[in-house]
Amino acid sequence: MENQTSSPGTVANIAAMCWSFHYAKRLLETVFVHRFSHGTMPIRNLFKNCTYYWLFALYIAYHVNHPLFTAPCKVCVYVGLTGFVLCELGNLSIHLLLKNLRPPGTKVRRIPMPDGNPFSLLLNYVSCPNYTYEFGAWVFFTILTKCAPVGIFAAVGMYQMSVWAINKHRNYKKEFPDYPKNRKAILPFIL
C-alpha cells in the first residue's frame, strides 16, 4: 500500500514557497496596487509589525523544519495548497477591484461592489473580502502544514483584521446611506 503521508521536507519546501509568495505578492501590491489616502503606518508600528512577522516566521519555520515534524497526509497538502492559492488570488482580485474604485489622484470613494470576477462575489456578503481571503489563506496554510504555530498566526491575524474590518464596515455604513444592509464586516453571516 502506498504511503499516504507527505514527506516532511516536501511540506517544508511548499510552506517556504507559499510564505515567500504571500509576502512577495504583498510587497508588489504595496508598490503597484495600493493607493494610500493618508498615513496608514505610524513609525512605531513598523517595529511592532516587523517583530510580529519575523518572530512568527522563525516560530513557524522552526516547527515545519524540525526533525520530529510529522507531515500531514497528501490530501491535506493538496487541499491546503489549492485553498491557499485560491485565497491569494481572491485577495489580489479584491485589491485590484478596490484600486479601480478610486481614480488616480482623487479622494473619490465609492461602495465596493462585485465586478465580473468571481472572486469579487464575496462583496455580496462582507465589506472587507480582502481580509476574508487573507484569513482563508492562513487557514489553508495551517491545513497544508498541520502546524499549531501557523494556526496561532492565523488566529492573531484574524483578530487584527477583524478590528480593521469592523471599523471599515462602520465607516462605510456611516459614509454611504445606501450601503448594503446585509453585509457583515469580514465573515459572511457571522461578523
Image (cartoon, rainbow, N blue to C red):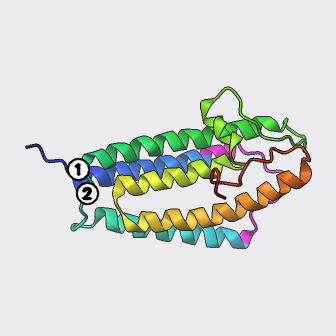
Instruction: Residue at 26% x, 49% y: name it.
Output: 10
Identify which amino acid the numbered label 2 is placed on: Ala
**Closer to the camera, 141 or 33?**
141
Mark 1 or 2 closer to N-term? Answer: 1
Query: Do the residues under discs 1 and 2 have CB atoms within 8 angstroms?
Result: yes
Is disc 2 placed on a helix, strand or loop?
Answer: loop
Query: In the drawing, what numbered circle is on residue 6?
Result: 1
**Residue 50 in the image: x percent, y percent?**
58, 67
Instruction: Residue at 69% x, 41% y: name it.
Output: 123
Is disc 1 placed on a helix, strand or loop?
Answer: loop
Identify which amino acid the numbered label 1 is placed on: Ser
Query: Is residue 55 visible to us here?
Result: yes
Secondary structure character of the magenta stretch overall = loop
Over which residues does the magenta segment extend?
A: 28-43
Quadrant in the picture for the N terminus: top left
Q: How far, Cα to Cα, is label 1 from label 2?
A: 6 Å
**Residue 44 in the image: x percent, y percent?**
71, 73
Instruction: Residue at 31% x, 55% y: name it.
Output: 12
Quadrant in the picture for the C terminus: bottom right
Query: Is residue 32 visible to us here?
Result: no
**Residue 52 in the image: x percent, y percent?**
55, 70
Of all residues shown, which one is farthest toward the left? 1
Side (left or right) of 22 relative to 74: right
Image height of 110 relative to 37, above or below: above
The picture quadrant where one finds residue 63 is: bottom left
- Would residue 32 be counted in the magenta stretch? yes
Q: Which residue is mark 2?
A: 71
